[in-house]
Amino acid sequence: MNVRNKRTGFPVESNNETAACSQSLASQDASDVQLQFLKDKWELIGAMSWKDYLAHGRGALVFTVSSERDDDWDCTYLPLREIQDHPLMCPYVNRLKQYDPEIEVVAIFLRPGGFVDAYRGSPAPKRLGPRQAYERLASAGALFWLELQ
């Protein structure tokens, strides 16, 4: 399923084949929360994505539900070579081969029950791209936040 969220501008794709069912209200709610999270944290997410792209090449920010809070996620960057071998994430390899890392990110959310939501894009044309977000944080001396991630 490909849908563009009107509030954030991110294209949305859910891979719910593991459940063999169409997108449910619960997964739509999850997508809304995820997209709002991406929008709210965009500058940090963009900067993290660019930093890891420079270090590891193409890849995605992979979010899992934090064990501490249900409304927050833990994040790690996985390079393309690791994602293509992962049974839940391999359907999104084409996104990783096609995105423009200077202006877009690929974000993959792994949810309980084997559900995966993937997003490719940037939230709005007037927002900073990943490279610009990284450079802005670097010039502000705030890159230490990225090292904590």
Image (tube, grey):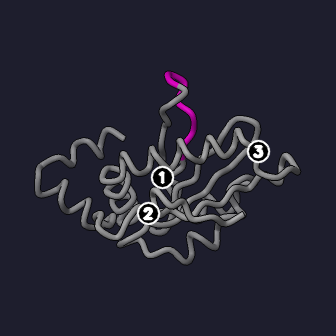
**Residue found 35% across the figure and 62% down from its top:** 50
Mark 2 vs mark 3: which is more N-terminal?
Answer: 3
- Quarter assignment of residue 93: bottom right
Which label number is shown at residue 24?
3
- Local packing at callout 1 (Cα closer than 10 Å; few below 14, some 14-19, many 20+) is many
> Residue at label 1?
77
Outermost residue, left direction? 140
- Of discs 2 and 1, which sits in the foreground? 1
Q: Is residue 132 left or right of residue 2?
A: left
Considering only order in the chain, which callout, 1 or 2, is on the residue closer to the N terminus?
2
Q: Quadrant of residue 55?
A: bottom left
The stretch drawn in magenta includes residue 65: yes
Task: Please identify, in this view, whether the residue under mark 1 or under mark 3 is nearer the observer.
Answer: 3
Q: Given the current orientation, which residue lies at the most extreme right position?
A: 20
Residue marked by disc 2 = 56
Q: Which region is colored magenta?
A: 63-69
Image height check: is 117 above or below 122?
Answer: above
- Residue at left 42%, top 64%? 122
**Proximity of marks 2 and 1: CB atoms separated by less than 8 Å:** yes
